[in-house]
Image (cartoon, helix red, strand yellow):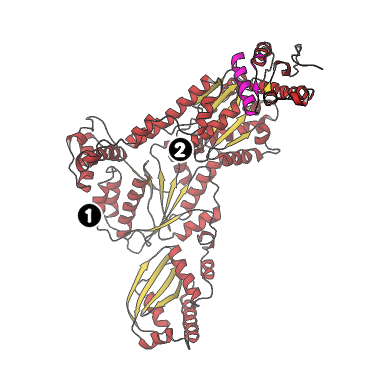
Amino acid sequence: MLFYKVTALITDEEWIKESKDRNIRDEFVDRVKDKTGEFNEHAGDGVYCFVSYIDGKKMICGIVSSGSFDADKIPGLFIEAVSTEVNGIKTEEITFSSAYKLMEISCRNHYIEDEDDIVERYGLEKINKRHYCSLQYDEKLIDGNKEKKAVYNAAERFFAIDTLTPELDRIYSGRTNEKAYGHPVHYLVETDNNEVCAKLTRTLLQALCGNGRLKSKRYCCVDIKPNQDISRFVYDTLYKSCAGGTMVVKYAANDDSEDDEFANSELEVISLICETAKKYRNQTLTVLCFPRNCEKIKSTFFEYLGAVSVIEIKEDLANAERSRRYLKMICKDQFVRADKALLNKIEDGKKYLPEELRNIFDVWYDKKMKTSVFPQYKSVETCRKTAAKKPERGSAFDELSGMVGLHEAKSVIGKALNYYKIQKIYKDKGIKQDKPAMHMVFTGNPGTAKTTVARLFARIMKENGLLSKGHLVEVGRGDLVGKYVGWTAQIVMDKFKAAMGGVLFIDEAYSLADDRGGSYGDEAINTIVQEMENRREDLVVIFAGYPNEMETFLNKNPGLRSRIAFHVPFADYDSQQLCDIARMIGKSKGVTLSEAAIAKLSAAFDSARIQPDFGNGRYVRNVIELSKMNQASRILSMDPDDVTEEALTSIEDVDIELPAVSDGFVNHRIGFAS
């Protein structure tokens, strides 16, 4: 599909006068509209021309073409048909969105009835971004005027000599049949750097366009995730709109999974991409873009693409000599000289990617700017050094630090935060690292603050810039397993979607693997594993439960265990810690526990801690609630004149009462009894 903007200089003074005369303006517009309709009816469905607006002596028109288009002939014929004399006709290709803007202006000026009629005529309504489009995409135009030498010079900046240069040689070797049109090959660009991917793709398309291998300079870029829900009709329409041009599909491949197979949802996405590429392979060029080293994903795509021929364009590793030449080239671009401090950073015998070299240059250049160009800033520290000196920021970390006990949990969470911080430094230094998984297992008995710490952890990650939202979504088996076959996977995906940017807290996850409806539980677990992989960049999954059951559960699911980075144990509280918790709970409720009350609690906790299913902090909270009720009864039995502020805000030993327990243990009732 081709879209054009035509600019012409009007030389017919009478025509210009009519276009401005308010008295005959309506007649003039109706005449242009009628002439436009007549021309398009005669031209057929392949071409639609329209006047957009007239600005003084300048007339702006738009053209939509679904087939071959004679840019030297059609614009002139259309302008002649609307009855005026012009010269200096200029025709330039534009994007669909730009063409739609011209249609809107034309409709406002009453040169056409409705812009959406044109869009519907060519079946483009589903990709019209001015209305609703379920698939986000960008449109760009190739600079097709690049000379061959300029294209090769641009290619030199990519470490792709072994793959890009030979393909450029093939492109520029000429065509054996000028009339035949199609795409003998399509492309797969492999790089971890989005900017390099864009520039490399643009260089490749410039060569193809310059040698007549593309009818249209327009290309659409779409980013697709493995679990993305894509409308087949919309995706097909977008591909069809690129006929004569190019579709650039950036697939967020993730190939470090230990599973042998992909989830059905991902295979559906891969199938859609490949089937559409095959369907339009002779009309629309496809450029797939993957991260490096995604062999399993690549193999799956090639299997689905079948007879389609694909040429791989990938970055090479550069040796030390070439790496130094590359650094000198960057320095030349910045009008600075490469010194020994920079060049000595390259180790002989080691190979580098361009992104690594660019990071090496950036660090060196930052220092050079402060030492040589602007020495007055030499003493100013970098943000990285300043940040490294600071403790974890945010009120959530202060709250966690102030909680009683939890020494192991605090230690592991502190290490986790340091681990994520170091990833940022690796990235700044240009050292490639695997994407860190943030998922965790919290193990401990009831009342050991697992949920509270999970909620604080989410806030800590948010406050330290490691999660975007920092909220907690808490679920159990009943929230994840559907009533009917096929429901569970969608329910799990919806929960993951709701938790994006925060923490998904799965309590007693091992209940998914019990004997109740095992197939549904298996479906939930399989979907959880896949979603953990797909969404790990901005989501933390925390599994919580009893230590023994959780260990058994993970042993049954090695794929799940491999995705969990941190195991956080929550130990039972000792009696002293329980007393400290009692003080904190009392303080939050506006009361103070007397020393006699604390002594009584300590003795009571010594006995309660050995009982089965002891509730730890939850148990303490119940004790304080009962004690406050007993305090109320005690105060109400006093003479009102004897009630002081201290009496109202104090819990005494006579107020202490322990909740009832079961399982054969005797309840030692302590405290005031009427």
- Residue 617 colored in magenta in the image: no
Judging from the image, what secondary structure is the residue with disc 2 in? loop
Residue located 38% across and 72% down the image: 6
Quarter of the N terminus within the rendering = bottom left
Q: How many marks?
A: 2
In this picture, residue 616 sits left or right of residue 387: right
Q: Are marks 1 and 2 in contact (CB under 8 Å)?
A: no
Q: Position of residue 267 (x, y in %)?
A: 53, 42
For disc 1, the marked residue is: 149
The residue under label 1 is which amino acid type?
Answer: Lys
Q: Residue at x 56, y 28 (%)?
A: 453
Is residue 558 visible in the rendered structure shown here? no
Front residue (pair 244, 509): 509
Which residue is pictured at 70% across the width and 39% down the height? Answer: 484
Instruction: Give the residue at mark 2.
Output: 465
Residue 320 point in image, percent of width and height: 22, 34
Residue for point 48% across, 34% down: 394
Label 1 vs label 2, nearer the camera: 2
Q: Quadrant of the C terminus?
A: top right
Q: Amino acid at mark 2?
A: Gly
Q: Position of residue 383 (x, y in %)?
A: 35, 37
- Give the class, few, some or many, for how many residues have Cα within 10 Å of label 1's Cα (few <14, many ≥20): few
Q: Is residue 64 left or right of residue 557?
A: left
- Judged left or right of residue 50, residue 573 is right
In magenta, the rendered stretch is 573-596
Who is closer to the viewer here, 433 or 310? 433
